[in-house]
Image (tube, rainbow, N blue to C red):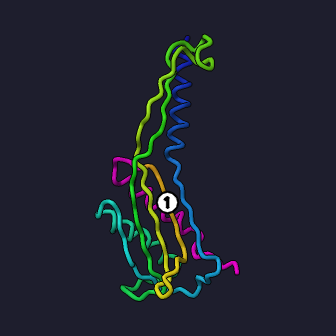
Amino acid sequence: MKLHIRIPAIIVMMIVLSTLMLAQEVQTDYDHHVDFSNYKTYSWAKVETSNSIWDGRVKDAVDKELQSKGLSQVPSGGDIAVVAVGTTRDKPTLETFYNGGFGGWGWRGFGDTATTTVQNYKEGTLVVDMFDPNTKKLLWRGTASDTLSDKPEKNTKKMDKGVEKMFKDFPPKAKT
């Protein structure tokens, strides 16, 4: 009987944890006084990730989105200077497992003992900035963060999805 109660509880905890860990966070912000319709071209100022193999992948994903929004890439002297920086870091999460019987009045009624461990997972963050090359003012910033897999193909798909979400409402409308 105890086993029948324990298995569903463990499955529910695993689903909740995996859902939280798989949630991609994307945010954007921009200068509300800028008329983005004035910008027609862009040039790359910098692409930097912790793994140089990813530099081209990031650039390709951002190029695809900017070009789909009507901007043209030029080798230098674009109306917008684009900078992309990718980082990774270890983030901790707590995992608690309840041991013992679920029938008694153990800790909060869930069992006799609880074991909590810290598990680290890798999170990747990509920041894309757009500057006015003449004034050096930041015009727009997008960030995407997600849990990384040990499979590069999955990470590429996550990055592509994050960049797509980043540019979903680009170009923003000026709120002057």
Q: Which residues are magenta?
A: 148-176
Q: Position of residue 71 (x, y in %)?
A: 49, 82
Instruction: Establish if 161 lies above or below 147.
Output: below
Quadrant assignment, res 42: bottom left
Q: Position of residue 4 (x, y in %)?
A: 54, 16
- At a point 39% along the width and 58% down the height, the residue shown is 87
Q: Position of residue 28 (x, y in %)?
A: 57, 66
Quadrant assignment, res 25: bottom right
Front-most of residues 4 and 131: 131
Quadrant in which the C terminus is drawn: bottom right
User: What residue sits right under mark 1 in the picture?
Assistant: 144
Front-most of residues 14 and 105: 105
- At a point 47% along the width and 78% down the height, the residue shown is 67
Q: Secondary structure at mark 1?
A: strand
Front-most of residues 93 and 53: 93
User: Does residue 104 belong to the magenta stretch?
Assistant: no
Q: Position of residue 150 (x, y in %)?
A: 34, 47
Mark 1, residues whose alpha carbon is within 10 Å: few (<14), some, or many (≥20)?
many
